[in-house]
Image (cartoon, rainbow, N blue to C red):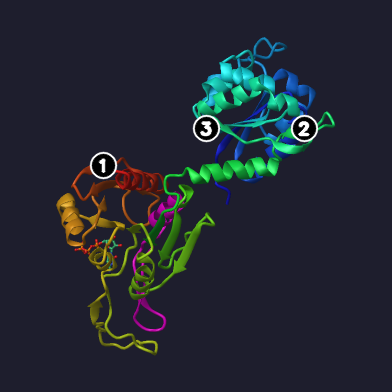
Amino acid sequence: MSILSGKKILLGVTAGIAAYKTAHLVRLFIKSGAEVQVVMTPASKDFITPLTLSTLSKNPVHSTFYDQENENELWNNHVELGLWADYMLIAPATANTLSKMSNGTCDNLLLATYLSAKCPVYFAPAMDLDMYKHGSTRESLEKLQEFENIMIPATSGELASGLMGEGRMAEPEDIVSFIEEDVLSKLPLKGKKILITAGPTYEAIDPVRFIGNHSSGKMGFSIANVAASLGAQVFIVAGPSQETISYSLVTRIDVVSAEEMYQACHELYEEVNIAILSAAVADYRPKNVVDQKIKKKDASLEIALEPTKDILASLGEIKKDQFLVGFALETNNEIEHAISKLERKNLDAIVLNSLQDKGAGFATNTNKITFIDAEKQLTSFELKSKSEVAQDIIQEIIKRLHA
Ligand code: CTP
């Protein structure tokens, strides 16, 4: 899945011949899963029609502050458009628009939107070679980059004038890859490896029966998705769960029992920077697993149980630089119990769920947590969806990684 999936991209089109390539560019963004809106300068409509771009982007195209033919029409709010975008791209960016952008001129909707945008702005210059080389253009390019806009450099080749040289807009595929790589390189968990456990474990009684629990795995899978979307390389060690992962960066290791989860975690622990253990691991397992299916008898049946290995505690014991996070599901004296667990298992943080909170815990789509760190600093959150809770957990960890 592209890192641009689900992102909102505002494409600004200016009046250069390369504008014809924006049809393909919009299609590539849509294919990557992004949502696209297009703003055009009035003159760019001579090079590509708004109808083409609105059809491909599945959104109306804006080019003026208001529709002169429709008196009842509301104005096109450049502030709203600027705030809507996760990323803005101006492609092609002509010498004229670049000069106006660098000087803060805003005599059209595109320029006003650019000045209002709070998101990262990319621009892909496109012009004839002498215009590209000109001192005033060079000055605009430098100034725009000083303002933290990101340039997607023009390439060399045959230009519309028939001349050969630098000034061709980068190809749409290269523009999309450039933005994807740039976004990835700036993600807060780029270069970090994260181990996450999720779901229940099943402890065999005989070949057809087991001791398990109602954990769905949703919390751990949500954390894995959020961590991957922020650039981490994620390993999820999952007990039996119906949940799926949407990021190709995630490695899923399916396990069944607590012992298998223990082994998988220990194999990975050495190389990870962060470990988040959200699995509901069975605390006990049958002492003897029977080879044959146990036959029904009239007398009552007793199954002797023995403790499983505590994976979290065992990782706490051998911890080096890893940031180790555990979960605690408590019913009474919650904070006290969670802090004692954090200390006992040598954790850097613990995520507390209280069974007294409605909507928290197992098999729900929501959760209500308190994040407690090693300094015993408590951060409590409202009841939220598990994917929002996952965002909160990861953000709390990121804050402490850089502290
Ligand atoms: N955990 C684990 N391995 C186990 C049991 C639990 O890694 N065998 C992890 C869970 O993934 C979770 C935390 O430990 O992060 C939960 O601990 P919990 O089972 O609540 O704590 P216990 O130490 O078992 O304490 P108690 O049962 O007394 O609450």
- The answer to which of marks 2 and 3 sits earlier in the sequence is 2
User: Residue 217 in magenta?
Assistant: yes
Q: As rendered, which of 215 and 103 lies closer to the eye?
A: 103
Can residue 5 be seen in this snapshot? no
Q: Which residue is mark 2?
A: 20
- The answer to which of marks 1 and 3 sits earlier in the sequence is 3
Q: Nearer the viewer, mark 1 or mark 3?
A: 3
User: Residue 77 in magenta?
Assistant: no
Q: Quadrant of residue 54?
A: top right
Disc 3 secondary structure class = loop
Real-space Cα distance between discs 2 and 3?
24 Å
Q: Which residue is mark 1?
A: 380
- Image region (quadrant) for ligand 1: bottom left
Mark 2, Cα crowd under 10 Å, few <14 / some 14-19 / many 20+, is many
Instruction: From this view, report whether residue 282 is shown above or below residue 136.
Output: below
Question: Which amino acid type is shown beneath numbered disc 2?
Answer: Tyr
Q: Residue at x 55, y 39 (%)?
A: 7
Instruction: From this view, report whether residue 322 is shown above or below residue 213.
Output: above
Residue numbers of the magenta segment:
199-227
Q: As rendered, which of 121 and 259 lies closer to the eye?
A: 121
Residue 102 percent location from the top left of the image: 58, 20
The label on residue 120 is 3
Question: Which amino acid type is shown beneath numbered disc 3?
Answer: Pro
Q: As rendered, which of 352 and 233 lies closer to the eye?
A: 233
Can residue 383 be seen in this snapshot? yes
Real-space Cα distance between discs 2 and 1?
52 Å
